């Protein structure tokens, strides 16, 4: 009798842990932006071990995020050195204060 109870419990846990690819893709995106709960992490890891497509999707998002971050870092020193000319500042002040 206890064997069947263990089997039922194992089956329920496995079903609960299982995620479809459709459920996994938003979770992958969320994991890159915010911390996941322990259960979400475990379910995501289990799916990624079994699904090469979702693992590839995660790697692609990580690559794109890294490239976007590098691009932003390259642009920022240029933007920091940009300043408005004194003439433009004066015209802007006049247009804001009629």
Image (tube, helix red, strand yellow):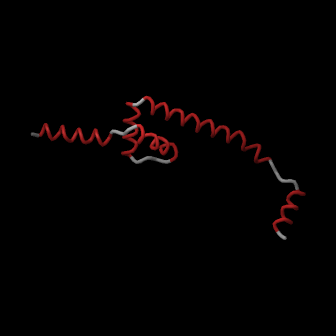
Q: Is 16 situated left or right of 95 in this image? A: left
Q: Is residue 88 above or below residue 10?
A: below
| Residue 3 quadrant | top left
Image spot of residue 40 (x, y percent): 39, 44
Residue drawn at point x = 43 percent, y = 47 percent:
36
Q: Which residue reaches farthest right?
A: 87
Q: Which residue is drawn at 59% across and 36% down?
A: 64
Looking at the rendering, in which quadrant would you find the C terminus?
bottom right
Residue 16: percent from left, percent from top: 30, 43
Instruction: Name which quarter of the figure residue 10 lies in.
Output: top left
Q: Position of residue 74 (x, y in %)?
A: 71, 39
Q: Which residue is drawn at 33% across and 39% down?
A: 18
Residue under the image location 27 percent in, 41 percent down = 13
Q: Which residue lies furthest to the left in this view?
A: 1
Q: In which quadrant of the rendered image does the N terminus lie?
A: top left
What is the residue that sits farthest to the front in this orientation?
22
Q: As drawn, is 13 to the left or to the right of 80?
A: left
């Amino acid at each position: 009798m206890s064997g069947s109870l263990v089997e039922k419990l194992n089956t329920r846990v496995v079903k609960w842990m299982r995620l479809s690819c459709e459920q996994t893709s938003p979770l992958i995106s969320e994991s890159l932006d915010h911390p996941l709960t322990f259960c979400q992490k475990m379910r995501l890891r289990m799916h990624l071990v079994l699904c090469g497509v979702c693992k590839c999707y995660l790697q692609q998002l990580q690559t794109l995020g890294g490239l976007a971050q590098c691009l932003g870092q390259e642009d920022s020193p240029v933007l920091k050195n940009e300043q408005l000319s004194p003439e433009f500042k004066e015209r802007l002040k006049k247009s804001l204060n009629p």
